Image: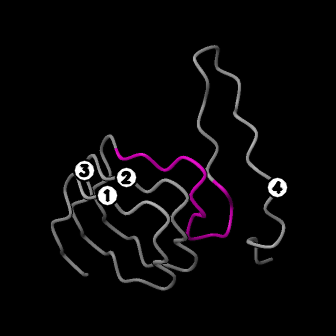
Amino acid sequence: MKKACLKKTNLQKASLKQADLMVANLEQANFYKTDLTDAKTYGWIIKNADFTDAIMPNGEIYQSETTDGELNQPETSENHLKK
């Protein structure tokens, strides 16, 4: 998927472990609960993409901010985190 244009794509709950997303255009894409563990993400374009509860390349679960600036608490996900 290197250099792919996936603008506005729905990737909800997809498993993109170790995917090569380098320089991919992912503007406004939906990554809700997507697993991006160990994905290559250098240079990806992610303007306005939704990463709510996604497992990011470093293994952390993305926590979006609420309107009052507080971080949302992620679901219990000890089974998903790799440390």
| In this view, 48 is above or below 9 | above
Q: Residues within 10 Å of mark 2 (few under 14, many from 20)?
A: many
Instruction: Using the numbered discs, state the Cα–Cα distance from disc 1 to disc 3 in whole angstroms.
Output: 11 Å
- Per the picture, the main secondary structure of the magenta-coloured stretch is loop
Horizontal and vertical percent for residue 31? 43, 57
Residue that numbered label 1 is attached to:
10
Q: CA distance from mark 2 to mark 4?
A: 21 Å
Q: Is residue 52 magenta?
A: yes
Q: Is residue 4 left or right of residue 44?
A: left
User: What residue is rendered at 67% in x and 69% in y?
Assistant: 59
Q: Earlier in the sequence, mark 1 or mark 3?
A: 1
- Separation of disc 4 and disc 1 at Cα? 24 Å
Q: Toward the viewer: 82 or 32?
A: 32
Picture quarter with the N terminus? bottom left
Q: Is residue 23 left or right of residue 79?
A: left
User: Which residue range is magenta in the image?
Assistant: 49-61
Classify 10 Å Cα crowding around label 1: few (below 14), some (14-19), many (20 and above): some
Looking at the rendered image, the disc whose residue lies closer to the viewer, 4 or 3, is 4
Q: CA distance from mark 3 to mark 2?
A: 9 Å
**For numbered disc 2, what is the local secondary structure?**
loop
